[in-house]
Image (cartoon, helix red, strand yellow):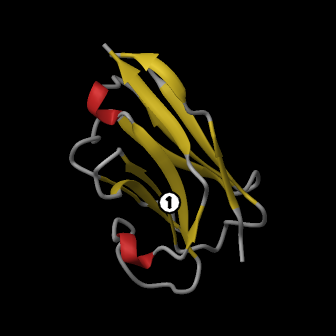
Amino acid sequence: QVQLVESGGGSVQVGGSLKLSCAGSKSIFSLYCMGWFRQAPGNEREVVAGIRADGSTYYADSVKGRFTISKDNLENTVYLQMNSLKPEDSAMYYCAAYSRGSVGYCLDIPLYDTWGQGTQVTVSS
């Protein structure tokens, strides 16, 4: 089973940018979905973006036009470029993989079976 390690979080001012990385311990090329999720204190975990094995991308409405998910199969890494950050984007960000199947919608949280430990993003005004 692949292990995932996130990095790239930090503190940024409103309107700033961050790029998160999620490194897989082995090949992510064939994984049907990989995604980014976030959870703020007191809130449920919510989906941010997903990317399918064929490169199709999906976004939560709250981040469309601001965030971009991408992956580098050679580097076994998934990225989340976050632009125009808002205070409400502050959260712990998690990377996850759906490794045990090949059907489903990549924004469905229950699909995901492997999770990283998270990286904190704080946006201040």
> Can you say whether 82 is above or below 53 in the image?
above
Q: At 51% from the left edge and 27% from the top edge, which residue is drawn?
A: 18
x, y percentage for residue 7? 64, 40
Q: At 34% from the left edge and 71% from the top edge, which residue is drawn?
A: 108
> Can you say whether 62 is above or below 66 in the image?
below
Q: Amino acid at mark 1?
A: Gly
Label 1 neighbourhood size at 10 Å, few (<14), some (14-19), many (20+)? few
x, y percentage for residue 41? 35, 45
Q: Residue furthest left?
A: 61
Q: Nearer the viewer, residue 29 or 94?
A: 94
Q: Quadrant of the N terminus?
A: bottom right
Give the side of residue 86 with respect to residue 102, left or right. Answer: left
Q: At 50% from the left edge and 84% from the top edge, which residue is drawn?
A: 102
- Count of numbered marks: 1
Judging from the image, what secondary structure is the residue with disc 1 in?
loop
To which quarter of the image does residue 13 belong? Answer: top left
x, y percentage for residue 87? 29, 26
Q: Nearer the viewer, residue 30 or 88?
A: 88
Q: At 27% from the left edge and 42% from the top edge, which residue is drawn?
A: 64
Give the side of residue 124 with respect to residue 3, left or right. Answer: left
Q: Quadrant of the C terminus?
A: top left
Q: Residue furthest front?
A: 42
Q: Identify the residue position indicated by label 1 in the image.
A: 55
To which quarter of the image does residue 10 belong? Answer: top right
